[in-house]
Image: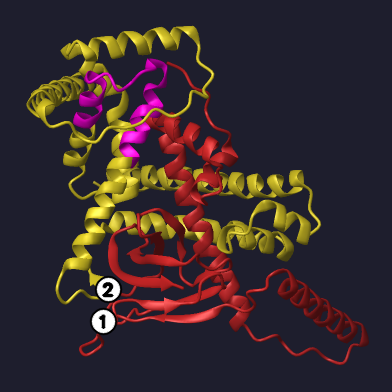
Amino acid sequence: MSSRHPEEDAFEDYVFHRLSEKRLGDFEEHLLVCEQCQEMLAETEEYIRLMKAATGAFAENLRTTPTPRRSDDSLRWNTAAAAILLLTCMTALFSWRNPSGDPKTVELQAYRGGNSSLQTIAPAGRALDLRLDLSDVRPSTGYRVEIVDAIGHRVWLGGTPVVLTNGLRPGDYWVRLATETGEPLREFGLRAE
Amino acid sequence: MRKAEETNQGKMGAEVVRRVVAVAVAASMNDEHPAESGEEEPSNVLDESESYAEWVALVDRIRASETDGMEELYQLFSRGIRFYLCRQLGPQELDDKVHDTFVVVVQAIRRGELREPSRLMGFVRTIVRRQVAAHIDKVVHTRRDQIDLDSTVRLADPEENPEEKAIFRQRTDLINRVLGELSDRDREILTRFYLLEQPQDLICSEMALTETQFRLLKSRAKARFGELGKKKLTHRALHTVLVRTSAGLSH
């Protein structure tokens, strides 16, 4: 029995659900019998989780850190003006290429007495910013979030903040909150329509 | 160390035999009630003639209900099936799920549903995926049928392993160091790929990168992370030795 090991990129593509059907079949068949690749996949998932947490923290820092005021310096002001102009153009370009626009904020609430709705509704096909109800959840330096569809296929994996730039296809989903080490904490129902 | 390994191997071997016997008994009892079987996927793998011969021989032995055939099949696939099921369904009742999957595989092979022995891996994969789908379907329906179904399910907060938590925090610190050493542009590229999950071609086109540049950046970051991790381990080991040495001297 022999089967070539997948390329390194294939592991990331597998975690991000980007493999074609054919490649997916070959990849999973190989994984069934190759301990080395199983470990490689586990390491890849862990690395992606770490990168999500770390880049998320950086992105958050950029959002919250105030820009220091600079002294009168024409070159600096010109550079700042140019950067703002460039950012505006890129935002416009991105909006043109990404018709879904700014992410829609969706609050996923824990069940409270009297609230009979089973699932939170979110618009399908639009970028989403999911805010999870963390009340009564044990505080942690970071959380892991996994989104699976109705048949259990993972569609997203990462940490908080949960920003889905490509949105979700219409359907039912479970949003699972876990500790950094993967222990489950809470689960939310979400429907995209 | 060798005795411990041999003891472990002995225990593993006994466990394998126990499971194989259990599977054989279950398969023979369930022959009257065939379980849902897998379909073969189109043959699309480059097979070496040696592998083909191995698969054929193995499948023949299983069809003949030979215990060593089932033992070999179990040793070959049990870890992979366990890995896949754990990843898809979590660690709960994993042993039972692996066992059930294995019974289905053996039954299907013995009924002659595997027409091409060279496609054994694809056959097993199909069965495992169907088992996963069936389990999820069952869970979803159970939840929907339950009265007072919450939109959330509060799961018992399990005991956290402090060591694992500390290790994760350390690794996160290392990644933060790696990111801190990069330029803003490189950091943005990695943020787009890992956090925003943008595909490579989109990032390359929007940030004027070649594929090579993109892959180089990713592998550099990963390599740097590995370097820092090794340095940290070396430093910790050295520190441990120095502490023990000084403790020894003080007595």
Give me the chain that's yellow. B
Q: What secondary structure is marked by label 2?
A: strand
Badge 2 is on which residue?
B152
Using residue A110 as the reference point, say whether residue B41 is left or right of it.
right
Majority SS type along the magenta span: helix
Q: Residues within 10 Å of mark 1 (few under 14, many from 20)?
A: some
Residue B202 horizontal/vertical position (percent):
71, 57
Q: Chain drawn red, letter?
A: A
Q: Quadrant of the N terminus of chain A?
A: top left
Relative to the observer, which residue lies in front, A163 or B167?
A: A163
Of residues A11 and B168, which is closer to you in this image?
A11
Q: Is residue A7 left or right of residue A188?
A: right
Q: Which residue is mark 1?
A: A111
Residue drawn at (41%, 37%) of the image? A39
Q: Residue at x 64, y 62 (%)?
A: B192
The stretch drawn in magenta includes residue B159: no
On the question of residue A33 being in view, the answer is: no
Part of the protein shown in magenta: B102-129
Viewer-side residue, B2 vs B71 = B71
| Relative horizontal placement of residue B149, taking residue A179 as reference (left or right) | left
